[in-house]
Amino acid sequence: MAKEKPQRQTSIDSTIEKLKIDQEIVLKNSTKITLININEIHELKLKNDIFMHNRISYSKTKLLELAENIAKLANEKAGILETGLLNPIMLRNNHGILERIHGDNRIKALKLNGANSVPAIILENVSDELARFMRSSENLNREDLNAYDETLSILEHIQLACNFESIESVKSFINKIKNFQAGKTSLNENEKILHKQVSDVFERVGRFDIITFVDRLSVLKLHTLIKQALVDEVISYTQAKVIKSKLTDDNEIRKILDVLKNKKLSVNDLKSYIDNMKTSKEPKLEVTNTYNDFTKLSTILTKKKYLLLKPEDKIFIDNKLKEIENIYLEIKSKIK
């Protein structure tokens, strides 16, 4: 085992260093920037028809801000090829098909602006392994990654560095390491070597150790609504975990997310709020419910009360009801 330990470390180093060298060579040989039709760009497709994860860190607000900044520069004929972009996207030529390595949000922003083309560098002779390395490295170097994207990027990096067959096999092995460290299972000799290799990757990334990362894996199972709120920066990761642990109903999740859009709650306050909400003891919000207020009015003005009104009051109410009728017809046209 003493000999295998440094040998395994050298294997990791050589894998990553080789990919870094390959990346430098590819980028050095591909410096030409070309305007590419956005509709001709495809997702990065690996062997066995596997598609890589797209970073979703950009909230809708950030994407609109990016689109606005690009539009301003484009109007001033600034940016690369006067498109408003400051950096080209990266594509690889995969047997005549242009696949995006990174630049997804820039493409989305350009589409929002009605643009049809994007400045790109087309890379030749890029293997699946190198394409994965370039994508995951670019993601991990970002400081604005949300918990979801960060987790997937680390899993992809481990898969690449340690030669796992899939992301699922990485997750399965990490959970096995947790059980091993808790004394609940054992590792064979090959698994012990792989354990060291995975630990080395975590040390390189510098954000987690294996045990704390196991807890982070729960972010991959978040409800779609919770995940989107996390991306849109409406909630924090710890708040997302609380909501996931306490709510499963879509309407209840929407309800608490609406609250968090207007109210800052600590994790403990959020737990209490959800518990109260589930027991119908929800605190009153400072927002009036117009729909409920309106429906109450229909129970106040009964026919009996109307007939007892003064003639001038009836005329006043008839005129107002006519206005309401017109508004109702407008509302009805919106309801399908």
Image (spheres, rainbow, N blue to C red):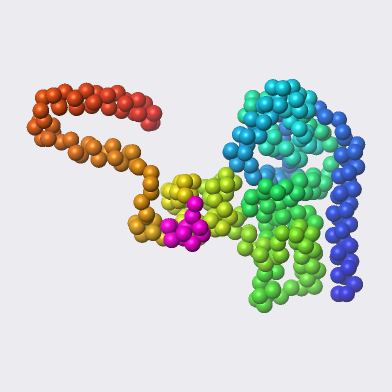
> Is residue 148 among the parts visible in the rendering?
yes
Q: Residue at x 45, y 49 (%)?
A: 259
Of residues 275 and 314, the one drawn nearer to the viewer in this rendering:
314
| Quadrant of the snapshot with the N terminus | bottom right
Q: Where is residue 335 shown, x and y percent of the image?
A: 37, 31
Left or right, residue 216 beside residue 257: right
Tell me which corner region of the image, top left, top right, bottom left or bottom right, holds residue 190.
bottom right
Q: Quadrant of the C terminus?
A: top left
Q: Residue furthest left?
A: 308
Residue that appears at 87% across and 58% down: 13
Q: Is 61 in front, or is 165?
A: 61
Q: Residue at x 78, y 25 (%)?
A: 81
Magenta residues, as a range?
264-274
Q: Position of residue 104 (x, y in %)?
A: 69, 38
Query: Does residue 47 show up?
Result: no
Q: Which is nearer the eye, 302 or 91?
A: 302
Q: Residue at x 54, y 47 (%)?
A: 234
Does 293 sit above or below residue 311?
below
Magenta stretch: dominant SS? helix
Q: Position of residue 76 (x, y in %)?
A: 72, 22
As drawn, is 267 to the left or to the right of 10?
A: left
Residue 115's spot in the image, x, y percent? 67, 25
| Number of numbered tags placed on the structure image | 0
Hey, which quadrant is residue 114 in on the image? top right
Q: Is residue 36 magenta?
A: no
Image quadrant assignment for residue 84: top right
- Residue 271 sits inside the magenta stretch: yes
